[in-house]
Image (cartoon, rainbow, N blue to C red):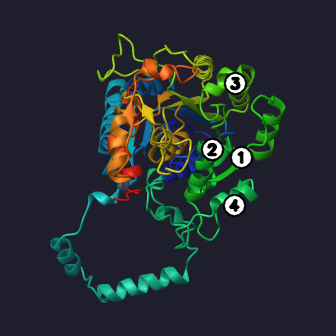
Amino acid sequence: MATTYKPKNILITGAAGFIASHVANRLIRSYPDYKIVVLDKLDYCSDLKNLDPSFSSPNFKFVKGDIASDDLVNYLLITENIDTIMHFAAQTHVDNSFGNSFEFTKNNIYGTHVLLEACKVTGQIRRFIHVSTDEVYGETDEDAAKLKNLGWSERTAWEDGLKKTMEWYIQNPEWWGDVSGALLPHPRMLMMPGGRVPDGSDEKNDSSSNAVQTFTVVTPNNKTGGSSDKAFLKFLIYGKTGWIGGLLGKLCEKQGITYEYGKGRLEDRASLVADIRSIKPTHVFNAAGLTGRPNVDWCESHKPETIRVNVAGTLTLADVCRENDLLMMNFATGCIFEYDAAHPERSGIGFKEEDKPNFTGSFYSKTKAMVEELLREFDNVCTLRVRMPISSDLNNPRNFITKISRYNKVVNIPNSMTILDELLPISIEMAKRNLRGIWNFTNPGVVSHNEILEMYKSYIEPGFKWSNFTVEEQAKVIVAPRSNNEMDGTKLSKEFPEMLPIKEALIKYVFEPNKRT
């Protein structure tokens, strides 16, 4: 093999990342004779906008994919006639590696192995450049001794050096650009009760709700700044007056993400188009819909309105997003299933994402099941099946715990449920990762009504009392039957392995922060 050669077709992995994107853009600009193929799976480490300068170039090609897919890698090497690989792809956020070590192993070790094996199989790669890190090395006394032998010596004490370094950074605050995003916690940590939000203030009370009411557009404070990837995010949220929609806005403010609430009505296509044209979002979140007040029984007597919003409106928004090449994060429901022979109660066998709805006992569930089936045809939609949502705000009447704590009698059936304090930040992370399709958006496992009320009694109200009644007895006091089921959480847990099981999440996010005894 010749020691020098002129590359013709270069594959760059992890090209939407910070360093690799600069290399790719530089090669495109400086070497128009090279064909540059870039591969990136677009997770939280990357941003497609980093490659904007290159998209119009004829010698540039972007492929969304994972280096861990051997079929894809082999296909690219052969069809694109790749002769050079520049391997940047890696999980780099060290703090995440402690709770998500398997993902780091998969990407950094297995992914690299796949690339090397593909080189061997195809036999056409002239050069493989692996961009690693100096963090694999540490310091030793022997290293220091070798430096001294070469004439190097320590002329400044460590403490003095630290002081000088700090003074230099204070005097040159703009030298490295905006790096304040490195100080922000991971998105999933921002809604932990008692957690401090690094917003440049020691105030614990969040006045963001007033800001949202006064201004529709909320932009990160320039003084505190946001990381460069957040500067490229702008969310359009539908459902401003709803529970989840309101929480999403507050969460965006805490994360420094620019967002705006939509003014259009879901069933009015022209108003949705106007929203997107004026706001120019990167993602659309749909938290709007009719659930009925005080409960889903309302939908039984308001069927045309329910269809108009839950079916026609949701499909219209999905189609408008599709036309504008936008990902729509759609908050749906898991109340479209009920225990059956294949999924018995307390069996641990949950309904999976690919399962078809089997519960249409309420008109609300019927519309939701219908629209979910139709949304399967849209490849730009991420459907999140929420069930019996719970948050740390026990004064909110929409909170499932608040509801059942106010009933005289409850049925005692185990169900899958959604802890919003933990999962709403995950929904934003899913948008960043460009995840699509249907997801069971519940914490792993099930918990019964009685188990929740026992926790409520233990943590909140020692003298609390309740009684049970059967589903048949319940049917006499409600208009429409209710859904009871277990959702399979494997898919979401694989993507976010740090997510807590439902009972642990209840204690951590709801009962411990509200503990009164």
Compute the Cα span from label 1 to label 4. Answer: 12 Å
- Say above or below: 314 vs 203: above
| First-in-chain label (1 vs 4) | 4
Residue 28 appears at what percent x and percent y? 60, 45
Residue 305 appears at what percent x and percent y? 74, 25
- Residue 261: assigned label: 1
Secondary structure beneath disc 1?
A: strand
- Residue 306: assigned label: 3
Compute the Cα span from label 4 to label 3. Answer: 31 Å
Secondary structure beneath disc 3?
A: helix
Report the front residue among 425 and 124: 425
| First-in-chain label (4 vs 3) | 4
Secondary structure beneath disc 2?
A: helix
Which amino acid, by three-letter code, is at mark 2? Gly
Compute the Cα span from label 1 to label 3. Answer: 21 Å
Q: Mark 1 or mark 2, which is nearer to you?
A: 2
- Say above or below: 479 vs 245: above
- Residue 245: assigned label: 2
Report the front residue among 7 and 226: 226
Task: Report crowding for label 1: few under 14, some 14 to 19, many 20 or more residues within 10 A (C-alpha).
Answer: many
- Residue 86: assigned label: none
Residue 495 appears at what percent x and percent y? 40, 36
Q: Mark 2 or mark 3, which is nearer to you?
A: 3
Report the front residue among 394 and 104: 394
Label 1 close to label 3 by CB (< 8 Å): no
Q: Which residue is mark 4?
A: 211
Which amino acid, by three-letter code, is at mark 1? Tyr
Label 4 close to label 3 by CB (< 8 Å): no
Residue 500 appears in the rendering: no
Task: Report crowding for label 2: few under 14, some 14 to 19, many 20 or more residues within 10 A (C-alpha).
Answer: many
